[in-house]
Amino acid sequence: MPQSAELWIKLTLPGSGQVGPGKVQLLREIREYQSIAAAARAMGMSYRRAWLLVDEMNRLFQQPVVAKWQGGRSQGGASLTAFGEKLVESYDVLVRRSTEVNRELL
């Protein structure tokens, strides 16, 4: 049985970059695991790729979306900043509302 269609929304910030479902999912995983490495493992991507995406997002906006901290012997971690939480929340609202509006078309 075919699954229902879904919207795939990518926000393009002129001259800066893009934020789409993959990066937002990475942020969700960082929120859950409090770790970029664990988030990367959960998504099946390399730590380096995840770290580069986080770095890109942190540079994309005037304020960071992820706060990283270092500690001794594997005690580092990461969490979403208040802005990062707002970004995930706003993206989810945008997708949900767009899906509702386009339900008949989908």
Image (cartoon, rainbow, N blue to C red):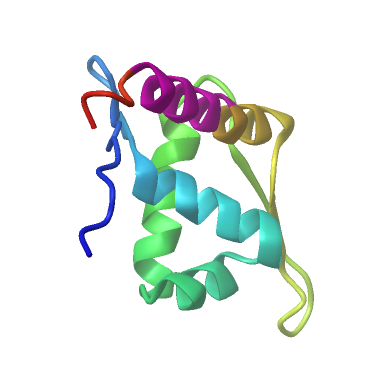
Instruction: Note whether 7 is above or below 42 in the view shown.
Output: above
Instruction: Note whether 69 is above or below 56 in the view shown.
Output: below
Instruction: Note whether 51 is above or below 73 in the view shown.
Output: above
Quadrant showing the N terminus: bottom left
Residue 74 placement, left or right of 3: right
The spot of residue 69 in percent (x, y) is 72, 58
Asked whether 77 falls inside the magenta stretch, the response is: no
Q: Write the residue at 70% across / 37% down.
A: 81
Residue 99 placement, left or right of 40: left
Q: Nearer the viewer, residue 25 or 68?
A: 25
The residue lying furthest to the front in this view is: 1
Q: Which span is picked out in magenta? A: 90-101
Q: How many marks?
A: 0
Q: Nearer the viewer, residue 1 or 37?
A: 1
Residue 71 placement, left or right of 50: right
Main secondary structure found in the magenta portion: helix
Q: Write the residue at 44% across / 60% down.
A: 51
Asked whether 94 falls inside the magenta stretch, the response is: yes
Quadrant showing the C terminus: top left
The spot of residue 72 in percent (x, y) is 79, 78
Instruction: Note whether 64 is above or below 32 in the view shown.
Output: above
Q: Is residue 69 visible?
A: no
Residue 85 placement, left or right of 6: right
Q: Write the residue at 46% across / 22% down.
A: 94
The spot of residue 57 in percent (x, y) is 44, 38
